Image: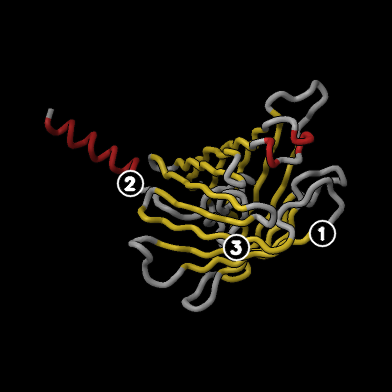
């Protein structure tokens, strides 16, 4: 009986304590903080999928009349490329609603060095026609601060985006940025400006492969989601 408890403890420890802070999915399904993308990408052969709840209060999709769910799959392909697929659908869609489909591509231009940040260029929804909602084209940099701040890891992120094509809505137009602080292996605290509003949130790493995102957009509307990551 004693050996069974030891085995159970070991298995639980493997499930809970192996996962730590790293690249994790934002509300868009791509690697980022709460809403904004960062210059961190998934590692080669990493595969993530999940669902995010998007609050209608700060959402142009569906006229801002409906909360939505965004289902996503994100793949790390080669050491410098991240590809994402997302399907967004209102919680109570009309009979003719087919949802919004988005493809995102993120290319790492440079990895982080001792004195230089990492750089990623990304494009969202570039295959869509004029009526698309989640267009973005941006360059973003991320840099881990040297040493430790309050016994944690602090990463700064700064980016700039443009409205590069006709669309109903663009994201991350102009300057955006944020900061993430990881006081331990199992939680990230985040604060960001997404070029329109200031958001706060946290990410909890559960079990071995699960991450729970909770965000307060403009500090007045809650959004969030759940993702599962594993290596192919």
Q: Earlier in the sequence, mark 3 or mark 2?
A: 2
Q: Earlier in the sequence, mark 1 or mark 3?
A: 3
Residue located beneath label 2 in the image: 17
Whole-percent x, y for residue 200 in the image? 54, 49
Give how far apart the Cα atoms at labels 3 and 2 are.
27 Å
Q: Residues within 10 Å of mark 2 (few under 14, many from 20)?
A: some
Side (left or right) of 130 relative to 4:
right
Disc number lying in front (1 or 3): 1
Residue 7 location, quadrant:
top left
The mark closer to the camera, 1 or 2, is 1
The x and y percentages for residue 28 are: 64, 46
Q: Are marks 1 and 3 in contact (CB under 8 Å)?
A: no
At horizontal 83% and vertical 24% (from top left) the residue drawn is 96
Q: Which label sits on residue 80?
A: 3
Disc marking residue 164: 1
Number of the front mark, 3 or 2: 2
């Amino acid at each position: 009986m004693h050996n069974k408890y030891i085995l159970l403890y070991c298995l639980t420890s493997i499930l809970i304590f192996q996962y730590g802070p790293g690249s994790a999915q934002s509300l868009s399904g791509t690697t980022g903080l709460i809403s904004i993308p960062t210059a961190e990408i998934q590692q080669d052969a990493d595969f993530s999928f999940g669902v995010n709840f998007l609050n209608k209060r700060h959402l142009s999709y569906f006229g801002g009349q409906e909360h939505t769910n965004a289902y996503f799959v994100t793949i790390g392909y080669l050491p410098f490329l991240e590809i994402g697929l997302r399907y967004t659908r209102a919680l109570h869609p009309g009979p003719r609603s087919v949802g919004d489909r988005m493809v995102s591509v993120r290319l790492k231009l440079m990895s982080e060095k001792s004195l230089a940040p990492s750089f990623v260029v990304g494009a969202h929804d570039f295959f869509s026609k004029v009526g698309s909602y989640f267009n973005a084209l941006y360059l973003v940099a991320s840099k881990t601060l040297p040493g430790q701040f309050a016994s944690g890891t602090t990463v700064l992120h700064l980016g700039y985006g443009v409205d590069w094509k006709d669309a109903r809505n663009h994201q991350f137009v102009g300057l955006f940025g944020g900061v993430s602080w990881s006081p331990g292996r199992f939680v990230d605290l985040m604060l960001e400006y997404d070029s329109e509003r200031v958001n706060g949130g946290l990410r909890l790493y559960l079990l071995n492969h699960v991450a729970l995102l909770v965000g307060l957009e403009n500090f007045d509307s809650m959004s969030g989601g759940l993702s599962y990551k594993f290596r192919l």
